Image (cartoon, grey):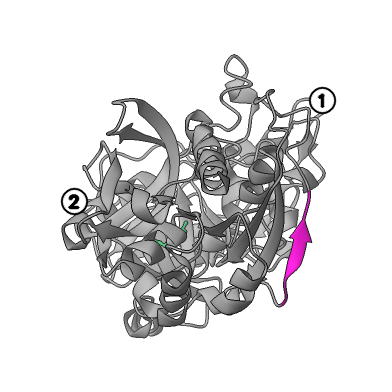
Amino acid sequence: MAAPPATASTPSRCVSGAKPRGAARRSPSSLALAAPPAGLRPCGSRALCVRAKVASGVQGASVVDDGVERPWKLSDARLVLEDGSVWKAKSFGASGTQVGEVVFNTSLTGHVALFTQASLMMGVRYQEILTDPSYAGQFVLMTNPHIGNTGVNPDDEESNQCFLGGLIIRNLSICTSNWRCKETLEEYLIKRNVMGIYDVDTRAITRRLREDGSLVGVLSTDQSRTDDELLEMAKKWKIVGVDLISGVTCDAPYEWSDKTNSEWEFKKDQSSETFHVVAYDFGIKHNILRRLTSYGCKITVVPANWPASEVLKLKPDGVLFSNGPGDPAAVPYAVKTVQEIIGKVPVFGICMGHQLIGQALGGMTFKMKFGHHGGNHPVCDLRSGRVDISAQNHNYAVDPESLPEGAKVTHINLNDNSCAGLQYPKMKLMSLQYHPESSPGPHDSDTAFGEFIELMKSNRL
Ligand SMILES: NC(=O)CC[C@H](N)C(=O)O
């Protein structure tokens, strides 16, 4: 079959390792030629003229420079997956070569509870995702095709750094339009040395991940490296069994006292009682801390390796085990800490914290095919039958069959019936596999913080 002509309307495609998809769609790169509407900020460098590199469109073909000046870029980055497929893309953010595990995130808009009518004006939760330490070692592919329209602002950070390996998107917005925007996504990624690629067929990659499971990949803007070299890198790299928590946790304990900003607070009946909570930082998101503070907690955050004996000496009302990156089976020191604490004070585990509790109880965790990443996962609370829409981000899960008697599954993910929450009443223990603190995102499960408060209250009586 003849290759389609390489023009501005040629979409980025998998040029090798096939499973080719249907007809070519219009490339958003051609949009870069249009002037943005008055008052909107152009994103800059992508619209600059460059000497075109043209992918021939033939499977297995490499990029060729046909010597023709074109006012758009067709390719300057590659994603090479461990299955041998090569995806041509354009680069934004940092340049270089980076290896990581590709996961897809299905989040649509943020702040849905507050801005239902205006959801198109809201950004996809990309900034929360970029600064969620649980994404360390991963490339996040956004299934929402249009990213960057609300830019970046200083208030939406979930931690002080971007720990993820890179961002993969279909279309980078040519302008930003939001009253809180301080810089473009592109500027932000460059400053933080995070790679980003756009104009790549994110739907095709997502389908591949859904069929074949999560895959390791290499992102590179380095034209001197061959596809085979990058493939070799992807095949050698491992994420299972690696302790990623030690790279994201804090260095020393600190106190936290920020509440959710009153402008965004949706729970008006605040508790009059104060509870002292020690929060283990396995890669903690700021909004977990803000929500606990809004519910009346005074928080001491401690590093992942902080001894349980030191925590118990503080006589806290409760202990929180936070979210965090990587394989829960790769951090036996954290499992031991959880074991030393559970049963002595009320505890709440979120995501990695939930998985560590599962292990500490003698249960097993396993790696899922491609995990759950997105702000639209239905979860059923088996105690009440209530269904919440939740934000999720995990690749591992607790095997409920492996749990001891006394530990009850309280929540299941309705997409696949996997374990989404646990309770062990005798130990005053509760945990969720997903994110009740999600912000922006659905607020349905915020009540879990209230449940933790009740657990601590009942322990005081
Ligand atoms: N958000 C998290 O805490 C992630 C948990 C764990 N690292 C996983 O991928 O399953």
Q: Residue at x 62, y 35 (%)?
A: 123
The image shows a total of numbered marks equal to 2
Is residue 293 or residue 376 the one in the foreground? 293
Graded by Cα atoms within 10 Å as few (under 14), some (14 to 19) or many (20 or more), the crowding at tag 1 reads few
Tell me where the magenta segment starts and ends, as one range.
252-257
Q: Are marks 1 and 2 in contact (CB under 8 Å)?
A: no
- Label placed on residue 447: none
Q: Position of residue 15 (x, y in %)?
A: 33, 61
Q: Can residue 348 be seen from the camera position used here?
A: yes
Q: Please tell me whether mark 2 sits on a helix, a strand or a loop.
A: loop
Graded by Cα atoms within 10 Å as few (under 14), some (14 to 19) or many (20 or more), the crowding at tag 2 reads few
Is residue 234 or residue 339 the one in the foreground? 339
- Asked whether 281 falls inside the magenta stretch, the response is no
Residue carrying label 1 = 38
Q: Nearer the viewer, mark 1 or mark 2?
A: 1
Q: Quadrant of ligand 1?
A: bottom left
Q: Earlier in the sequence, mark 1 or mark 2?
A: 2
Q: Is residue 122 above or below residue 170?
A: above
Outermost residue toward the left in this view? 401
The quadrant in which residue 390 appears is top left
Amino acid of disc 1: Ala
Q: Is mark 2 within 8 Å of ligand 1?
A: no
Q: Residue at x 39, y 29 (%)?
A: 388
Residue carrying label 2 = 1
Q: Is residue 54 left or right of residue 433?
A: right
Q: Can residue 76 be seen from the camera position used here?
A: no
Q: Please tell me whether mark 1 sits on a helix, a strand or a loop.
A: loop
Q: Is residue 315 left or right of residue 380?
A: right
Q: Position of residue 20 (x, y in %)?
A: 24, 52
Q: Position of residue 100 (x, y in %)?
A: 45, 71
